[in-house]
Amino acid sequence: MKTVITIVLAAGAGKRLGGPKALLAWPAGAKGGAERPLAIAHAEARLAAESARVLVVVRTSVFHALLAHVRPGIDLVSWTAPDDLGPAGSLAVAAPRIGDADAVVVTPVDVPPASAATVAQLLARLDAGASTAAPPLAVRPRHLGRGGHPVVLRAEALQRYLEADPPPLRDHLRALGDRCVDEEVDDPGVLHDLNVPVDVIRVLGGPPRFLA
C-alpha cells in the first residue's frame, strides 16, 4: 500500500465504562513517558507504524481535553451528531477527510492499540489481491476463529459513507460479500474489548481512570 491513514472511532459516551473512552488513561508508550488518553495512544501507535495521518472522531465535549495531546499527524474531528448514529455516523464524518489515502485502518477506540505487525499483516493481505479481477476491499482480523479489530479497507470501500444513510461498519462489511476477507492472526489482542470496568482491569490491572 502506498498511503495509509487511520480512523479512530472515539465518539462514544462510555456510559458502561464510567467515562469517555477517548479519555481513558493509557500507559506511556515509552519508558519514562507520561500516560495519555487512549484515543491518543491509538493515534501514536499508528503514526509510529504504517499510517501517514490519523483522524480521531470525538465528541465536542472531549475535544478540548484532547487538544493538549495532539501532535503533527493527528487530526481531531469534532462530532455533534445524535447518539443513535453510532459508528456509522462517525465514519460518515471521517470519510470525506481521507484525502488521497490508498488504504484506511478503522479502529474503535475501545480496544487496545493494535500492534504494528498485526496491521502490517492485514495490509499485506489487502495488497496481495490487488492484481486479481476482484481484489479484496476489506480485511478483518480473526484469532482462533473469532473476529476482531481493527479492519483495513481500500479507500474506495468507504464510498458508501459519503452517501445518505450509511450502515454500521459490520453491516457494510457483510454487504461487500466475497470482497471482504478474513485474515487469521497470531494476536489475541485483536479480541480485547474495553466496554466495562472489568475489561480494563483485565488489560491494565486496575480500574479505569479518565484524563480530563
Image (spheres, rainbow, N blue to C red):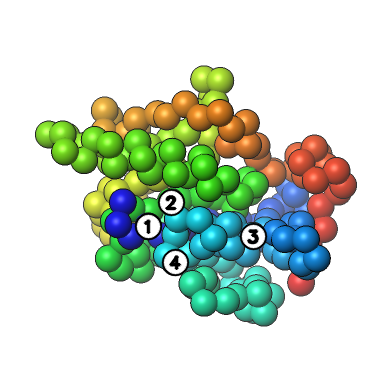
Mark 2: secondary structure: strand
The residue pinned by badge 2 equals: 105
Query: What residue is at 47 percent from the left and 33 percent from the top?
Result: 141
The residue pinned by badge 1 equals: 4
The residue pinned by badge 3 equals: 41
Pick the residue in front: 132 or 139: 132
Q: How far apart are labels 3 and 2 at the CA level?
A: 15 Å
Amino acid type at mark 2: Val
In terms of sequence position, does the residue under pointer 4 or pointer 2 come before the other?
4
Residue 170, percent from left and from top: 42, 38
Q: How far apart are labels 1 and 4 at the CA level?
A: 8 Å
Mark 3: secondary structure: helix
Front: mark 2 or 1: 1
Residue 209, percent from left and from top: 82, 58
Query: What residue is at 85 percent from the left and 43 percent from the top?
Result: 205
Q: Given contact means CB atoms under 8 Å apart, are the residues at marks 2 and 1 in contact?
A: yes
The residue pinned by badge 4 equals: 53
Query: What residue is at 24 percent from the left and 52 percent from the top?
Result: 156
